[in-house]
Image: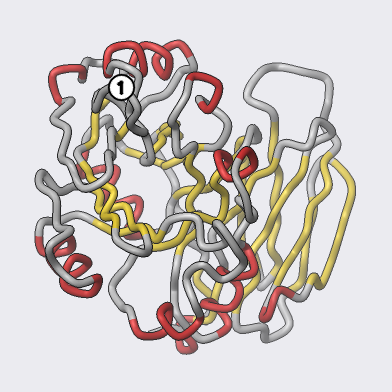
Amino acid sequence: MYKNPYQNLTNGKWCKTNFHTHAGTGYKTCGVNPIDTVVDLYRKANYDMLCISNHNIFTDASDFSDENMLMIPGVEYTKDRHMLTIGVNKSLHDEDYQTAINMTNDMNGFTILCHPNWPEKEYFSRERLNELSGYAGIEVMNRVIYRLSGSGLATDTWDYLLSQGKLIYGFGNDDFHILTDAARSFNLIYCDDLSYNSMKQAIDDGEFCASTGLYPEYLKLENDIIKVKVKFPIQTYIDTFTYRFITENGEVVSVQNGSFAEYKLNGEKYVRVEAIGENGAMIFFQPIYLTEKFL
């Protein structure tokens, strides 16, 4: 039986969120900018949720929450590889990777493996990805990498994991260090209200997308036919996009240009959808998948 994580979205809203933000740690650090400056920058970019996630330091930014933007606790676990431990209020860097993931889950948090293709391809090796368990997802888009080295795109890693039968979700984050890093990649999370628990439930259920500028209008599954439509966040006459349907090992099974697209499932383990706008903005939907193929 196929599962579509977007099938029953009602009475909520898409919350624009960045989980990977460095701020408030001082001169010559990743978080050189003051927290209030960074928070204000994201407010002006219409974010609903923001996490200040410094390297191995918990930064309490809860006082910056208000009715329009919720501050999410978290830390970037940093050793030879990096992970975002979201929902935690302390650094777990003294623990090994698996223990840190387990502890994060025990605290009602979740873990995102950072920039899998920085500074080189397969920064997170296939062996390590297979050894670890219990993490929610990976950064399929990390825009800061494009001013560093390697690739900020990690759909190759995502498709590898999905092809192994691991239900891993794709996240998009800024990895904010300097002012020009802001609002370039984000998560759109379907929340019933502006609260941590609502956000966490949506993450658990895969009710979110990674984006660099496009928004979902719908992704439906009717009689094994995927029906999808995206849009720009502002009102515009532009209504033509490129839709890509992707399955095991990154195989592109259909490319369509138009205002919407459809694809008939044919027994694939999973199919995920990407869409691209005329300005290059992208959106990455979580996969539709056969439940019996994913444990």
Which residue is painted at 64% across and 54% down in the image?
151
Q: Which quarter of the rendered picture does the C terminus lie within? A: bottom left
Residue extending furthest right? Answer: 257
Disc 1 crowd rating (10 Å Cα; few below 14, some 14-19, many 20+) is few
Q: Residue 287, position in %: x, y? A: 56, 66
Which residue is painted at 77% across and 66% down in the image?
263
Q: Residue 112, position in %: x, y? A: 36, 57
Residue 257's place in the image compared with 62, above or below, is below
Residue 22's place in the image compared with 223, above or below, is above
Residue 228's place in the image compared with 266, above or below, is above
- The image quadrant that residue 96 belongs to is bottom left
Q: Residue 129, position in %: x, y? A: 43, 78
Three-letter code for the amino acid on which mark 1 is drawn: Tyr
Lateral position of residue 115 relative to residue 274, left or right? left
Q: Residue 199, position in %: x, y? A: 29, 43
- The image quadrant that residue 168 belongs to is bottom left
Total marks in image: 1
Secondary structure under badge 1? loop
Which residue is painted at 45% across and 79% down in the image?
166
The one of 61 and 229 positioned closer to us in this rendering: 61
- Provide the residue designation for mark 1: 27
Lateral position of residue 159 relative to residue 202, left or right? right
The one of 102 and 276 positioned closer to us in this rendering: 102
Protein image colouring: secondary structure
The one of 22 and 163 positioned closer to us in this rendering: 22
Residue extending furthest front? Answer: 28
The one of 150 and 66 positioned closer to us in this rendering: 150
Which residue is painted at 22% across and 43% down in the image?
74
- The image quadrant that residue 233 belongs to is top right
Lateral position of residue 245 relative to residue 90, left or right? right
